Amino acid sequence: MISIYPAVARSIVVAAALAVTLCVFGFVGLTSAHPPNAPASSQSATQAATQAAYDRAMELLQQGKNAEALSVIDAAIGAGARDPSLFNLKGLAASELGRDADAEESFRTVIRLSPKSPMGYNNLGVLLSKLGRYDDAAKNFRDAHARDPQNFTALLGLGTSLAALHKYSEAASYLEKAVTVRPDDFQAGYECAHTLYEAKKPEAAMRALKKVAVPQESESAAKYYSLAGAIAESLHDDTAAARSYRQAYAISSSYEIYLPLVQATLLADRASSNAAPVLDNLPAPPENLTSDQNLALGLLFLSHVAYQQAIPQLERALQQDESNETATLNLVLAYKSVGKSSDAIELTHRALEKKPSGALYNLLAELEESAGQYVDAVQNYQRAVELDPTNEDYYFDLGMEYLSHFTFGPALEVYRVGTQKFPRVAREYLGLAFSHYAVREYPQAADAFTTALEIDPESPAVLKAWSTVLSALSPADWEAILPRLSRLEEAHSQNADIAFFYGAALFRSEFAMGPKGDLDQARSFLERSIKLRPDFSAARIELAGLYAAQKQDQKAVDEYLEAIREDPKSDIPHYRLGQIYRQMNKLDLAAEELARYQELSRLHQEEIKRNRSAIQQFVLAPPGKSNN
């Protein structure tokens, strides 16, 4: 006779924390066997008593009366019954009552009584799987498989146990065999597809899943569509993933399915020109979400710049937990992004009244800066620094607030403290360098720029900023900088920018020496810079200037023309090219270039005036307390 063990479930995660229930297989039984060495006359009576006990226990188990069933079985065993099927039922009843140790012992007895049958090994494997002992479970399923290579329970159990141990490739081989044995079994097909998915074989996983019929039972159908969505995501088919997750969510309106549905929809939306209708047609989220769930959903929308969809979720999260600073900060950003600046400022003020923090003051300052409330902004940047003097962001933001409004003395002090507190942060030195530069302390600016370059020689911001000092230093100023640039160039010989910086610095230093100066080394570094980056306009302008200094006018012209082709809006090469043409007595060409220079220069000056006029009069706020 065969008894079916109730579902043994283990949970795994598909996609974004999507829980699905797996590993359903059952215990199996054997027909009764005569007790060994029993006299022939007693065998029939013992067998009859065992069969009666078995039938009665089975009846009680089917009625859910597990304790009564176990009593019947124990009585029969106490009377001398040694039938493996009876011990099999005892294991089932004990497990149903939560007596796992007794169940394990019963199944091991089945194995001792019938070592050549897969039944005991399979049943023990099922029990051990339920207990999370997957190594031991796999060993028992292997023993069952060795005794019957086509045994479905052994194949399915071994595959799922190995999958639980993350041995996905090996697991898939057994699950594929299980599917061959029972091609219409949903669990085998589903497990096979899921294991192939975990093995990073999404194409094979999708092929396996398509062979599985969608079950009628709702929980299994939701599992099917959820897995289909996860596999489609790994195949970068976000439209198909969103469609499958939507089908799963229609069956089971759970948060664990809704989150990947939103993610896939947003990704599909990014690749589609019909973004708004896709988002508008999203189903409503599940009811009664926790604060953390609303927050996670809001952050997901926010990360895809879906601000309108993020706001309701973040508002709910904040209603549920008013002290949640993460929800507050992100809701403020969402308000700001949709043009609700006043709401953003009001919310930040309310949050600060309840619990002041550096993050909130820094965010409030950003909002006030955007709203033109410059005095309030600088005061709140200062408060952020005072509340959290270990946060480098706050120092940098405060310094930038001063710099952007041309209050260079306070900016200089902020960045001086910032570089002391954060000596390995390049942008603090950039702030210090620009502050020195603004008050015409060029050697100090060059020192700070070079320190930033030494800290982060690959940073685009640092590389762009360093060239600021090129035209500001005297020949004597370069003496302290050149050895540092030389070491940088040796350490980063394939960096076009550093080769340009060193070549330009050498050019200026050597050119200042007059006839004694040697420009050949400078030229070699500038030429290397252009070789490393052929479209390097600034390096071509510098090399053209060097050629002009060496009276190689045509080479200079060629480099200036190339620089203009690479950067048509730059006015400097037009001016210098006009001067070269004059020296070459090509006056018409000189006039054209100088006229073009004047036009570009005028446009450049107008742009500067527009930028300056956009900055309102800045009133210096009272300084905050020292942060040394």
Image (spheres, grey):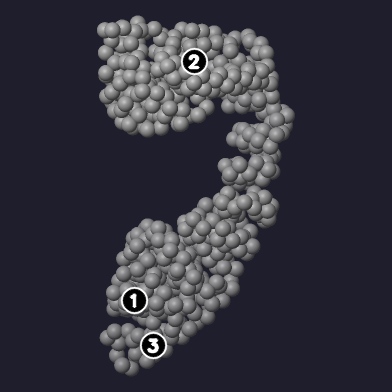
Spatial separation of the CA atoms under disc 1 and disc 3: 23 Å
The vertical placement of 294 against 488, above or below, is below
Residue 237 in the figure: left or right of residue 154: right
Residues packed near mark 1 inside 10 Å, few (<14), some (14 to 19) or many (20 plus):
many
- Which of pointers 1 and 3 indicates the residue nearer the eye? 1
Q: CA distance from mark 3 to mark 2?
A: 98 Å
Mark 2 crowd level (few <14, some 14–19, many ≥20, 10 Å Cα)? many
Q: Position of residue 95 (x, y in %)?
A: 46, 67
Query: In this view of the protein, can residue 75 be seen by the observer?
Result: no
Report the front residue among 196 and 267: 267
> Along the polypeptide, which appears first: circle 1 or circle 3?
3
Q: Three-letter amino acid code at disc 2?
A: Phe
Horizontal placement of 408 versus 345: left or right?
A: left
Q: Is residue 140 above or below residue 442?
A: below
Q: Which residue is mark 1?
A: 118
The residue identified by callout 2 is: 434
62 in relation to 239, above or below: below
In space, the residues marked 2 and 1 are separated at their CA atoms by: 79 Å
Task: Give the foreground label among 2 and 1.
Answer: 2
User: Which residue is label 3 attached to?
Assistant: 47
Q: Position of residue 502 (x, y in %)?
A: 33, 19
